[in-house]
Amino acid sequence: MELQLLKKVPIFTALKENQLTHIVKYCITKKYAKDQLILVEEEAGKTLFIIYKGRVKVTRTSDDGREVILSILESGDFFGEMSILDGKARSASVTALEDSELLLLRRGDFLQLLEDFPQIAIALLKELASRLRKSDSQIKSLSLQDALGRVSSTLILLAEEIGKMKDEAVLIPKIPLQQDLANMAGTSRETISRVFKSLEEDGYIVRQGRKLRIPNYEKFKMIFS
Ligand code: CMP
């Protein structure tokens, strides 16, 4: 089962079947319940995690105790690489958003794999570049934009991370709770609710329960990013 998953993990896609079989030997599987803390900010990091099933949120706690969501990761994504690479403490906390199953790789084994298979290192750098780009646009939206800009930038971030493209539209199957969205956008729950209502009235988004659809995603991005 791990082999099937590893084939889909972007940092491993360049590898051949026999190389993946080799990697599977180093992995162990672990289950986490919804809301369970997987790793904690400031702890020492000894493990790399790959999401087999489920979704997690990456968060930091602000000085006044508010939780800020940095990212939501899902099946095929990895986390925990930062402290493995630089040897420093965990940069953020990670919590399961739903019942999840993860593959764990020990620090020494992962570093060895990077040496043995340079394709993994290249794919890892590519993913880190993409995360840095997202962080750059988050910084831009938090520092420059008004409430509408912040909320729509958060929607674009979610669409890029967990959205499913269909023709011109993008569907975010399970949008985070309004308080979580507020923490991501650096605004209040009331503002999220007000901006969503106005975006909905103008036809930019369509909501149905926890599903959110952006009917014309390219146009949305052009207007709001
Ligand atoms: P590490 O610092 O070991 O532990 C926390 C993990 O959260 C970190 O590695 C990354 O894998 C992940 N992480 C931290 N910041 C971000 C971010 N901005 N976007 C996505 N993942 C992140």
Image: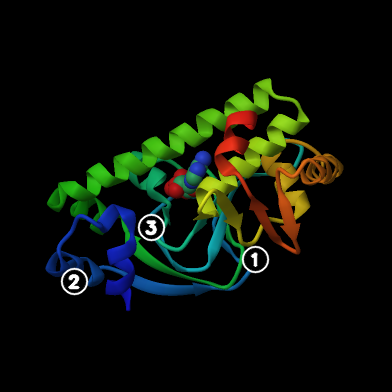
Judge depth for marks 2 and 1 and give the one in front. 2
In this orientation, which residue lies closer to the viewer: 145 or 90?
145
In the image: residue 203, left or right of residue 158: right
Determine the residue positioned at 59% across, 56% down.
Answer: 171
Distance Cα–Cα, label 3 vs label 1? 20 Å
The residue beneath circle 2 is 21
Is ligand 1 less than 8 Å from the beta carbon at label 1? no
Judge depth for marks 3 and 1 and give the one in front. 1
Marks 3/2 in contact by CB < 8 Å: the verdict is: no
User: Picture quarter containing residue 199?
Assistant: top right
Where's residue 168, x and y in %?
54, 48
Q: Amino acid at mark 1?
A: Asp
Q: Amino acid at mark 3?
A: Thr
The image shows residue 150, relative to residue 49, as above or below, that is above
Per the image, label 1 sits on a secondary structure element best described as: loop
Marks 2/1 in contact by CB < 8 Å: the verdict is: no
Determine the residue positioned at 30% across, 69% down.
Answer: 27
Determine the residue positioned at 56% across, 48% down.
Answer: 159
Badge 1 crowding class, 10 Å Cα cut-off, few under 14, some 14 to 19, many 20 or more, is: some
Is ligand 1 less than 8 Å from the beta carbon at label 3? no
Task: Name the residue at the bottom extreme.
Answer: 1
Judge depth for marks 3 and 2 and give the one in front. 2
Q: Which mark is residue 35?
A: 1
Where's residue 33, x and y in %?
59, 73
Per the image, label 3 sits on a secondary structure element best described as: strand
The residue beneath circle 3 is 47
Q: Earlier in the sequence, mark 3 or mark 1?
A: 1
Name the colour scheme.
Answer: rainbow
In this orientation, which residue lies closer to the viewer: 189 or 37?
189
